[in-house]
Image: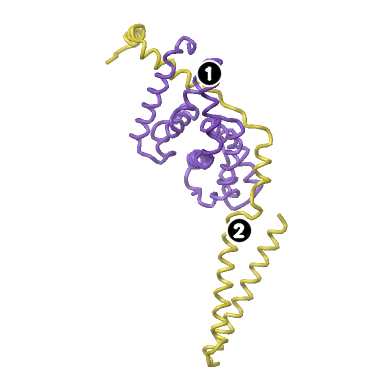
Chain colours: A purple, B yellow
Amino acid sequence: MTPDIPRDTLLRARMGDRDAFRTVLESVQKLAYNIAFRLTWNASDAEDATQEIFLRLFRNFPQYDPEQPFLPWFRRLATNCTLNWKEKRRPTSELPEQIAVHDAAPVDSSERLHQAIRELPQEYQACVTLKYLEDLGVGEIAQTLQVPVGTVKTWLFRAREILVQKLKPHVETLL
Amino acid sequence: MMTNCDETRDHLEACEDCRLHVVVEARMRTLPVLEPPKGLVERAMRALPRVAPVKREFFRLAAAAVMLIGLSIAALNSGLEETRTVASVKARTGQAIETTSAVFNAWRSELWKH
């Protein structure tokens, strides 16, 4: 999921060219939607968060330094934007989802895994998403989340520990 | 410390915790990549503000320049004696206003085209 966007397109989009901006959105929509989905775990919320990411990209594009690679900058923007969006929405949208998570019996191992990830603290979720979805190294994750590398290592370690503990009773279904 | 694959396999055979770690790690790597819903980009494009941030920044600067020049003129016209220096500043300020408004109008008409 690493779209290749021509430099010229990025520069035009940065200057406010709408056609170029549309091209950029088409290139990054899959990445943005998947980051949003892995942090919200709900298709409708992921769509709303993705719209927010695109709006934030439009507003913040002049701050992008064209001498730097675009994707890490965009990944950081998308992750932070989704986390902020979630934070703002927490009182209204997250409560029913939490109840639903505990009430519903997971049907298969994927759902069980998703549920376990969904219940992680949000910084752990962000780490797990960037590591396993985007296949980033700890250095890149640290850069994206703007935290020290050691913190990322700790979060990933704890996230894995929590997942292993939660999935232990269902190990046979995971195989 | 494991030195080769056989030892690793032997350990996994015996250790349930490590087996579970490997399984979870492997499952995490198979999380599906989702396709975004159709029309996502179109909806985003429709929701964008009409004026691009770079242009908006220009408008802010232009508005600030016009205000500054306006205030200077008001100050010059209000109570200053019409010396040669004051007259020269007045003339230059007038030119600056004309230039700024011409640039501003050019940008505005450019915007209406989009």
Judging by the rendered image, the residue that carries numbered circle 1 is A110
Nearest to the observer: residue A11 or residue B9: B9
Residue drawn at (43%, 39%) of the image: A145
Q: Position of residue A151 (x, y in %)?
A: 35, 35
Q: Is residue B27 above or below residue A144?
A: above
Residue A71 seen from this side: no
Residue B74 seen from this side: yes
Chain to which the residue tagged by mark 2 belongs: B
Q: Quadrant of residue B22?
A: top left
On screen, residue A88 versus residue B7, left or right, reads right
Q: Position of residue B31 (x, y in %)?
A: 52, 22
| Helix, strand or loop for disc 2 | helix
Quarter placement of the N terminus of chain A: top right
Amino acid on which the number 2 mark rests in the picture: Lys
Residue drawn at (64%, 75%) of the image: B98
Extreme-left residue of the structure: B1
Q: Is residue B3 above or below residue B79?
A: above
The circle on residue B55 is: 2
Q: Nearer the viewer, mark 1 or mark 2?
A: 1
Q: Position of residue B74 (x, y in %)?
A: 57, 82
Nearest to the observer: residue B27 or residue B85: B27
